[in-house]
Amino acid sequence: MIFNEDSTTRDDLAADAPHDDRLPTYVNAGQSYERDMRYVTTRITRDGRSGFKVEPGRYRLIAARACPWANRTLIVRRLLGLEDVLSVGMPGPTHDARSWTFDLDPDGKDPVLGYERLQEAYLALDPDYDLGITVPAIVDVTSGKLVTNDFDQITRDFSSEWVDYHRPGAPRLWPEDQREEMEAVMRRVFTEVNNGVYRCGFAGSQAHYEAAYTRLFDALDWLEERLATRRYLMGDHITEADVRLFTTLVRFDAVYHGHFKANRNKLTEMPVLWAYARDLFQTPGFGDTIDFQQIKEHYYIVHSDINPTRIVPAGPDLTGWLVPHGREALSDSPWGEGTAPGPVRDAERVSSGHNPLYPA
Protein backbone atom coordinates (compact mmCIF):
# COMPACT_ATOMS: atom_id res chain seq x y z
CA MET A 1 0.00 0.00 0.00
CA ILE A 2 1.29 3.49 -0.87
CA PHE A 3 0.96 6.25 1.71
CA ASN A 4 0.81 9.98 1.17
CA GLU A 5 3.36 11.99 3.12
CA ASP A 6 0.58 13.58 5.16
CA SER A 7 -1.40 10.44 5.83
CA THR A 8 -1.72 7.08 7.45
CA THR A 9 -4.36 4.42 6.88
CA ARG A 10 -6.01 1.86 9.12
CA ASP A 11 -4.05 -0.97 7.50
CA ASP A 12 -6.53 -3.56 8.86
CA LEU A 13 -5.74 -2.63 12.46
CA ALA A 14 -8.47 -2.63 15.10
CA ALA A 15 -9.53 0.87 16.05
CA ASP A 16 -9.08 0.10 19.73
CA ALA A 17 -5.63 -1.47 19.45
CA PRO A 18 -3.45 -0.08 22.24
CA HIS A 19 -0.44 0.74 20.08
CA ASP A 20 1.14 0.00 16.73
CA ASP A 21 4.88 0.23 16.28
CA ARG A 22 4.76 -0.27 12.54
CA LEU A 23 5.66 2.65 10.33
CA PRO A 24 3.96 3.26 6.98
CA THR A 25 5.80 2.60 3.75
CA TYR A 26 5.92 4.98 0.82
CA VAL A 27 7.92 3.44 -2.02
CA ASN A 28 6.48 0.88 -4.44
CA ALA A 29 9.36 -0.82 -6.23
CA GLY A 30 9.43 -0.19 -9.95
CA GLN A 31 6.68 2.42 -9.90
CA SER A 32 6.41 6.19 -9.87
CA TYR A 33 4.84 7.90 -6.89
CA GLU A 34 1.17 8.79 -7.33
CA ARG A 35 -0.51 10.85 -4.60
CA ASP A 36 -3.90 9.58 -3.47
CA MET A 37 -6.15 12.63 -3.90
CA ARG A 38 -9.29 11.13 -2.38
CA TYR A 39 -10.47 13.37 0.45
CA VAL A 40 -13.58 14.11 2.47
CA THR A 41 -14.81 17.16 0.57
CA THR A 42 -17.58 18.46 2.84
CA ARG A 43 -17.35 22.25 3.10
CA ILE A 44 -17.99 24.63 5.99
CA THR A 45 -19.86 27.59 4.52
CA ARG A 46 -21.29 30.98 5.47
CA ASP A 47 -24.86 29.87 4.83
CA GLY A 48 -24.52 26.28 6.00
CA ARG A 49 -25.66 24.90 2.64
CA SER A 50 -23.37 21.94 3.16
CA GLY A 51 -24.87 21.18 6.55
CA PHE A 52 -21.94 22.84 8.31
CA LYS A 53 -22.14 26.57 8.93
CA VAL A 54 -19.22 28.76 9.90
CA GLU A 55 -19.59 29.31 13.64
CA PRO A 56 -16.98 30.61 16.09
CA GLY A 57 -15.73 27.87 18.38
CA ARG A 58 -17.60 25.02 16.72
CA TYR A 59 -14.67 23.56 14.78
CA ARG A 60 -11.09 22.57 15.50
CA LEU A 61 -8.33 22.61 12.92
CA ILE A 62 -5.89 19.73 13.31
CA ALA A 63 -2.61 20.67 11.66
CA ALA A 64 0.79 19.09 12.33
CA ARG A 65 3.60 21.62 12.01
CA ALA A 66 5.72 19.00 10.24
CA CYS A 67 3.37 18.63 7.26
CA PRO A 68 3.60 21.16 4.37
CA TRP A 69 -0.08 20.73 3.45
CA ALA A 70 -1.14 21.42 7.05
CA ASN A 71 1.37 24.26 7.29
CA ARG A 72 -0.65 26.10 4.62
CA THR A 73 -3.66 26.20 6.92
CA LEU A 74 -1.63 27.49 9.86
CA ILE A 75 -0.28 30.35 7.74
CA VAL A 76 -3.62 31.34 6.18
CA ARG A 77 -5.45 31.09 9.53
CA ARG A 78 -2.88 33.48 11.01
CA LEU A 79 -2.79 35.91 8.08
CA LEU A 80 -6.59 36.23 8.15
CA GLY A 81 -6.80 36.46 11.94
CA LEU A 82 -9.01 33.43 12.56
CA GLU A 83 -7.32 32.36 15.80
CA ASP A 84 -10.24 33.35 18.04
CA VAL A 85 -12.78 31.70 15.75
CA LEU A 86 -11.10 28.43 14.86
CA SER A 87 -9.01 26.64 17.49
CA VAL A 88 -6.05 24.53 16.51
CA GLY A 89 -4.72 21.17 17.65
CA MET A 90 -1.20 20.12 16.70
CA PRO A 91 -0.19 16.45 16.56
CA GLY A 92 3.44 15.57 17.08
CA PRO A 93 5.81 15.20 14.15
CA THR A 94 5.84 11.41 13.92
CA HIS A 95 3.12 8.82 13.49
CA ASP A 96 2.76 5.09 13.06
CA ALA A 97 0.83 3.09 10.48
CA ARG A 98 -2.49 3.98 12.08
CA SER A 99 -2.60 7.70 12.70
CA TRP A 100 -1.16 11.02 13.71
CA THR A 101 -1.15 11.21 17.51
CA PHE A 102 -1.43 14.04 20.03
CA ASP A 103 1.73 13.06 21.85
CA LEU A 104 2.78 16.66 22.48
CA ASP A 105 -0.30 17.37 24.60
CA PRO A 106 -0.67 16.59 28.31
CA ASP A 107 -1.60 12.94 28.82
CA GLY A 108 -1.21 12.43 25.07
CA LYS A 109 -4.70 13.71 24.31
CA ASP A 110 -5.98 16.70 22.37
CA PRO A 111 -7.31 19.01 25.13
CA VAL A 112 -10.49 19.90 23.23
CA LEU A 113 -11.41 16.67 21.45
CA GLY A 114 -10.06 14.31 24.09
CA TYR A 115 -8.62 12.11 21.35
CA GLU A 116 -5.26 10.35 21.46
CA ARG A 117 -5.31 9.81 17.69
CA LEU A 118 -6.69 11.85 14.83
CA GLN A 119 -8.00 8.53 13.53
CA GLU A 120 -10.75 8.71 16.17
CA ALA A 121 -12.37 11.70 14.44
CA TYR A 122 -12.32 9.87 11.10
CA LEU A 123 -13.88 6.73 12.56
CA ALA A 124 -16.49 8.83 14.37
CA LEU A 125 -17.56 10.04 10.92
CA ASP A 126 -17.41 6.59 9.34
CA PRO A 127 -16.52 3.43 11.31
CA ASP A 128 -15.50 1.82 8.02
CA TYR A 129 -13.29 4.70 6.84
CA ASP A 130 -10.26 3.18 5.14
CA LEU A 131 -8.59 6.05 3.28
CA GLY A 132 -5.77 8.27 4.51
CA ILE A 133 -5.82 9.73 8.03
CA THR A 134 -4.48 13.07 6.82
CA VAL A 135 -3.70 16.53 8.08
CA PRO A 136 -4.95 19.19 7.82
CA ALA A 137 -8.34 18.11 9.09
CA ILE A 138 -11.25 20.08 10.52
CA VAL A 139 -13.31 18.39 13.21
CA ASP A 140 -16.76 19.36 14.46
CA VAL A 141 -16.20 19.80 18.20
CA THR A 142 -19.88 19.25 19.00
CA SER A 143 -19.88 15.73 17.54
CA GLY A 144 -16.19 14.84 17.47
CA LYS A 145 -16.53 13.91 13.79
CA LEU A 146 -14.28 14.82 10.91
CA VAL A 147 -15.86 17.41 8.62
CA THR A 148 -13.20 17.75 5.93
CA ASN A 149 -9.58 16.95 5.13
CA ASP A 150 -9.63 18.56 1.67
CA PHE A 151 -6.44 20.59 2.06
CA ASP A 152 -6.89 22.52 -1.18
CA GLN A 153 -10.42 23.67 -0.39
CA ILE A 154 -9.88 24.40 3.31
CA THR A 155 -7.69 27.44 2.74
CA ARG A 156 -9.84 28.65 -0.16
CA ASP A 157 -12.82 28.62 2.21
CA PHE A 158 -10.87 30.42 4.94
CA SER A 159 -10.68 33.35 2.52
CA SER A 160 -14.24 33.20 1.15
CA GLU A 161 -16.57 31.44 3.59
CA TRP A 162 -14.98 32.64 6.85
CA VAL A 163 -14.78 36.26 5.67
CA ASP A 164 -17.18 37.57 8.34
CA TYR A 165 -14.56 36.71 10.95
CA HIS A 166 -11.44 38.03 9.26
CA ARG A 167 -9.37 40.47 11.28
CA PRO A 168 -9.41 44.15 10.27
CA GLY A 169 -6.72 44.56 7.65
CA ALA A 170 -6.73 40.93 6.53
CA PRO A 171 -5.02 40.65 3.13
CA ARG A 172 -6.84 39.60 -0.05
CA LEU A 173 -5.22 36.25 -0.69
CA TRP A 174 -7.47 35.49 -3.69
CA PRO A 175 -7.65 38.73 -5.73
CA GLU A 176 -10.45 38.42 -8.28
CA ASP A 177 -8.59 40.23 -11.05
CA GLN A 178 -5.75 37.67 -10.89
CA ARG A 179 -7.75 34.53 -10.21
CA GLU A 180 -7.38 32.85 -13.62
CA GLU A 181 -3.61 33.32 -13.84
CA MET A 182 -3.22 32.46 -10.17
CA GLU A 183 -5.00 29.13 -10.61
CA ALA A 184 -2.66 28.24 -13.47
CA VAL A 185 0.44 29.20 -11.47
CA MET A 186 -0.72 27.25 -8.42
CA ARG A 187 -1.54 24.21 -10.54
CA ARG A 188 2.00 24.14 -11.88
CA VAL A 189 3.49 24.74 -8.44
CA PHE A 190 1.43 21.87 -7.02
CA THR A 191 2.11 19.30 -9.71
CA GLU A 192 5.77 20.13 -10.33
CA VAL A 193 7.08 21.43 -6.98
CA ASN A 194 4.81 20.69 -4.00
CA ASN A 195 4.19 17.15 -5.23
CA GLY A 196 7.32 17.04 -7.36
CA VAL A 197 9.65 16.62 -4.40
CA TYR A 198 7.65 13.53 -3.37
CA ARG A 199 7.91 12.06 -6.85
CA CYS A 200 11.67 12.25 -6.38
CA GLY A 201 11.72 10.91 -2.83
CA PHE A 202 9.25 8.08 -3.29
CA ALA A 203 10.28 6.98 -6.79
CA GLY A 204 10.44 3.21 -7.11
CA SER A 205 13.09 3.06 -9.84
CA GLN A 206 16.07 5.00 -11.13
CA ALA A 207 14.20 5.97 -14.29
CA HIS A 208 11.19 7.28 -12.38
CA TYR A 209 13.46 9.20 -10.04
CA GLU A 210 15.42 10.83 -12.85
CA ALA A 211 12.24 11.86 -14.66
CA ALA A 212 10.85 13.37 -11.46
CA TYR A 213 14.16 15.12 -10.75
CA THR A 214 14.17 16.75 -14.19
CA ARG A 215 10.56 17.93 -13.85
CA LEU A 216 11.19 19.39 -10.40
CA PHE A 217 14.23 21.42 -11.35
CA ASP A 218 12.68 22.58 -14.62
CA ALA A 219 9.89 24.07 -12.49
CA LEU A 220 12.30 25.61 -9.99
CA ASP A 221 14.19 27.24 -12.88
CA TRP A 222 10.88 28.64 -14.15
CA LEU A 223 10.15 30.06 -10.70
CA GLU A 224 13.66 31.52 -10.45
CA GLU A 225 12.99 33.39 -13.69
CA ARG A 226 9.43 34.45 -12.78
CA LEU A 227 10.43 35.85 -9.40
CA ALA A 228 13.44 37.76 -10.70
CA THR A 229 11.23 40.70 -11.69
CA ARG A 230 8.35 40.49 -9.20
CA ARG A 231 8.45 40.30 -5.43
CA TYR A 232 5.68 37.70 -5.15
CA LEU A 233 4.30 35.07 -7.48
CA MET A 234 1.41 37.26 -8.59
CA GLY A 235 3.19 40.61 -8.47
CA ASP A 236 3.37 43.26 -5.74
CA HIS A 237 1.26 41.60 -3.04
CA ILE A 238 1.18 38.33 -1.12
CA THR A 239 -1.46 35.84 -2.27
CA GLU A 240 -2.21 32.24 -1.39
CA ALA A 241 0.02 31.21 -4.29
CA ASP A 242 2.97 32.35 -2.17
CA VAL A 243 1.71 30.39 0.83
CA ARG A 244 1.57 27.22 -1.25
CA LEU A 245 5.07 27.59 -2.66
CA PHE A 246 6.64 28.70 0.62
CA THR A 247 5.79 25.53 2.55
CA THR A 248 7.84 23.48 0.08
CA LEU A 249 10.74 25.92 -0.21
CA VAL A 250 11.17 26.25 3.55
CA ARG A 251 11.62 22.46 3.81
CA PHE A 252 13.88 22.13 0.80
CA ASP A 253 17.38 22.19 2.27
CA ALA A 254 16.36 20.62 5.58
CA VAL A 255 14.76 17.52 4.06
CA TYR A 256 14.09 17.45 0.30
CA HIS A 257 17.66 18.09 -0.88
CA GLY A 258 19.14 15.10 0.95
CA HIS A 259 16.31 12.87 2.12
CA PHE A 260 14.40 13.05 -1.18
CA LYS A 261 17.55 13.26 -3.35
CA ALA A 262 16.42 16.57 -4.89
CA ASN A 263 20.05 17.55 -5.00
CA ARG A 264 20.94 19.34 -8.22
CA ASN A 265 21.44 22.29 -5.93
CA LYS A 266 20.24 23.59 -2.59
CA LEU A 267 17.70 26.36 -2.22
CA THR A 268 20.53 28.51 -0.88
CA GLU A 269 22.24 28.07 -4.26
CA MET A 270 19.30 29.49 -6.23
CA PRO A 271 19.72 33.22 -5.56
CA VAL A 272 16.27 34.46 -6.53
CA LEU A 273 14.28 31.68 -4.86
CA TRP A 274 16.48 31.85 -1.76
CA ALA A 275 15.90 35.60 -1.41
CA TYR A 276 12.16 35.12 -2.06
CA ALA A 277 11.94 32.37 0.56
CA ARG A 278 13.83 34.49 3.12
CA ASP A 279 11.52 37.40 2.36
CA LEU A 280 8.47 35.30 3.20
CA PHE A 281 10.14 33.64 6.19
CA GLN A 282 10.79 37.07 7.69
CA THR A 283 7.17 38.13 7.03
CA PRO A 284 4.78 37.76 10.02
CA GLY A 285 2.59 34.71 9.58
CA PHE A 286 5.08 32.69 7.54
CA GLY A 287 8.37 31.95 9.29
CA ASP A 288 6.80 32.07 12.73
CA THR A 289 4.78 28.92 11.91
CA ILE A 290 7.86 26.84 11.01
CA ASP A 291 9.31 24.21 13.34
CA PHE A 292 12.43 22.89 11.64
CA GLN A 293 13.05 20.24 14.29
CA GLN A 294 9.58 18.75 13.89
CA ILE A 295 9.94 18.87 10.12
CA LYS A 296 13.19 16.90 10.22
CA GLU A 297 11.89 14.39 12.76
CA HIS A 298 8.83 13.69 10.64
CA TYR A 299 10.62 13.00 7.38
CA TYR A 300 13.68 11.19 8.68
CA ILE A 301 11.87 9.05 11.26
CA VAL A 302 8.55 8.24 9.60
CA HIS A 303 9.99 7.54 6.14
CA SER A 304 11.98 4.58 7.43
CA ASP A 305 11.84 2.78 4.08
CA ILE A 306 14.11 5.46 2.60
CA ASN A 307 15.98 6.24 5.86
CA PRO A 308 16.14 2.89 7.66
CA THR A 309 18.47 4.15 10.41
CA ARG A 310 15.91 6.84 11.32
CA ILE A 311 18.80 9.15 12.23
CA VAL A 312 17.76 12.82 12.15
CA PRO A 313 20.41 15.19 10.72
CA ALA A 314 21.78 17.87 13.00
CA GLY A 315 21.91 20.46 10.19
CA PRO A 316 21.53 22.52 8.18
CA ASP A 317 22.56 25.86 9.68
CA LEU A 318 19.38 27.95 9.90
CA THR A 319 20.83 31.39 10.62
CA GLY A 320 20.78 32.28 6.92
CA TRP A 321 16.98 32.57 7.07
CA LEU A 322 17.42 35.87 8.91
CA VAL A 323 19.87 37.44 6.42
CA PRO A 324 18.36 40.53 4.71
CA HIS A 325 16.80 39.65 1.35
CA GLY A 326 16.68 43.01 -0.43
CA ARG A 327 13.45 42.29 -2.28
CA GLU A 328 11.73 45.45 -1.01
CA ALA A 329 13.13 47.10 -4.14
CA LEU A 330 10.59 45.14 -6.20
CA SER A 331 7.57 46.18 -4.12
CA ASP A 332 6.99 47.88 -0.79
CA SER A 333 3.38 46.80 -0.24
CA PRO A 334 3.28 43.10 0.65
CA TRP A 335 -0.22 43.32 2.14
CA GLY A 336 -1.85 45.45 -0.55
CA GLU A 337 -4.50 47.49 1.25
CA GLY A 338 -4.26 45.22 4.29
CA THR A 339 -1.87 44.98 7.22
CA ALA A 340 0.43 42.44 8.79
CA PRO A 341 -0.97 40.06 11.42
CA GLY A 342 -0.18 40.70 15.06
CA PRO A 343 2.19 38.74 17.29
CA VAL A 344 1.92 34.97 17.57
CA ARG A 345 -0.24 33.78 20.46
CA ASP A 346 1.93 32.42 23.27
CA ALA A 347 0.17 29.05 23.15
CA GLU A 348 0.95 28.70 19.43
CA ARG A 349 4.56 29.81 19.46
CA VAL A 350 7.19 27.48 17.99
CA SER A 351 9.46 25.90 20.59
CA SER A 352 12.67 27.78 21.32
CA GLY A 353 15.60 26.39 19.39
CA HIS A 354 13.41 24.98 16.60
CA ASN A 355 13.43 28.16 14.51
CA PRO A 356 16.00 30.99 14.21
CA LEU A 357 13.26 33.48 15.08
CA TYR A 358 13.09 31.79 18.49
CA PRO A 359 16.66 30.90 19.51
CA ALA A 360 17.32 28.42 22.29
Image (cartoon, rainbow, N blue to C red):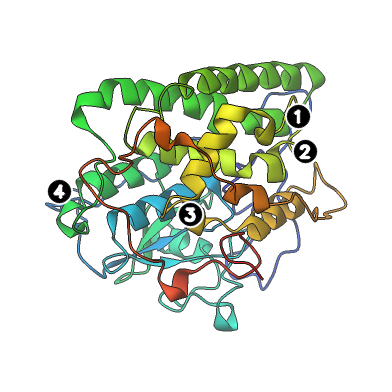
Q: Amino acid at mark 4?
A: Arg
Q: On the rendered image, what quadrant is the C terminus found in?
A: bottom right
| Amino acid tagged 1 | Asn
Question: Which quadrant is home to the N terminus?
Answer: top right
Q: Position of residue 150 (x, y in %)?
A: 39, 44
> Is 138 displayed left or right of 164 in the figure?
right
Residue 2: where, in percent of width, then height? 66, 38
10 Å crowding of disc 1: few (<14), some (14-19), many (20+): some
Q: Give the mark nearest the N terminus, 2 or 1.
A: 2
Q: Nearer the viewer, mark 3 or mark 4?
A: 4
In this view, the mark in front (4 or 2)? 2
* 172 relative position to 289: left or right: left
Do the CB atoms of the residues marked 2 and 1 lie less than 8 Å apart? Answer: yes
Q: Which residue matches tag 2?
A: 258
**Relative to 307, is 109 on the left or the right?**
left
Separation (CA) of disc 1 from disc 4: 47 Å
Residue under label 3:
128
Residues 306 and 38: in front is: 306
| Disc on res. 49 | 4
Task: Say which label, 4 or 2, has the lower sequence index.
Answer: 4
Check disc 3 and report its element: helix, strand or loop: loop
- What number is the disc on residue 263? 1
Residue 142's place in the image compared with 317, above or below, is below
- Observer-nearest of 327 and 237: 327
Q: CA distance from mark 2 to mark 3?
A: 38 Å
The x and y percentages for residue 63 are: 48, 58
